[in-house]
Image (cartoon, rainbow, N blue to C red):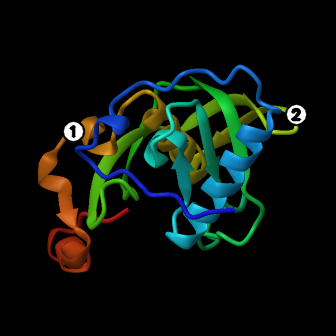
Amino acid sequence: MAILKIARMGHPALIRPAEPVADPKSPEIARLVADMIETMDDSDGRGLAATQVHVGKRVVVFRPPPDKPGLPDDRTGPALALINPEITPLTEETEDGWEGCLSVPGLRGVVPRYTRIRYKGVTPAGEVIDREVSGYHARVVQHEVDHLDGVLYPMRMDDLGLLVFESEFERFTEETGAAD
């Protein structure tokens, strides 16, 4: 396995739509997924898309958060790899929430996301995944799949006044009340 170089905002790899994977069970995809998980963990990330590591394929990895509300963000469970993921909103309702990104280091922003989605994809073992999720889980999946379509979270923001440096985040949220 290897730690891969993460593209940062401004790199053309991040705005090119990714191509579908023809053979999800190929050794190349298995190696890519293993390297992406290692890179995500090494970077303390919650998810990672192949386009973020300069690979134009429709592959994302993430650690699904706990199902129970109120539990802390848990990055110790097994990572899930989705190949050729598809998202369908299950409601028109959206919720604003703070997001960060390994490709937009040092910044956080408030992004509206659908509160409930259905996602489908295939694992590297060929298993079909079809889940309905809400809350933070839905947010993470939408964020990662956006990368595959060449979309970074600042492009989804309604108010760029809510794009802040992480070093100012605590003070900003305390003084403005703009918290999750």
Observer-nearest of 170 and 120: 120
Observer-nearest of 14 and 101: 14
Q: Residue at x 31, y 65 (%)?
A: 179
Give x and y (percent) for residue 57: 56, 31
Q: Residue at x 28, y 43 (%)?
A: 11
Give x and y (percent) for residue 162: 18, 55
Looking at the image, residue 102 sits to the left or right of residue 144; the answer is: left
Q: Along the polypeptide, which appears first: circle 2 or circle 1?
A: 2
Asked whether the viewer can see residue 106, the reply is: yes
Give x and y (percent) for residue 54: 45, 42
> Which picture quadrant has residue 29?
top right
Looking at the image, residue 138 sits to the left or right of residue 106; the answer is: right
- Where 151 falls versus 106 (above or below)? above
Placement of the N terminus among the 4 image quadrants:
bottom right
Q: In terms of secondary structure, where does tag 1 sit?
A: loop
Q: Residue at x 65, y 69 (%)?
A: 75
The type of residue carrying mark 2 is Glu
Reading the image, the residue beneath label 2 is 127
Reading the image, the residue beneath label 1 is 158
Q: In terms of secondary structure, where does tag 2 sit?
A: loop
Q: Residue at x 57, y 42 (%)?
A: 141
Looking at the image, residue 117 sits to the left or right of residue 78; the answer is: left
The type of residue carrying mark 1 is Asp
- Where 35 falls versus 57 (above or below)? below
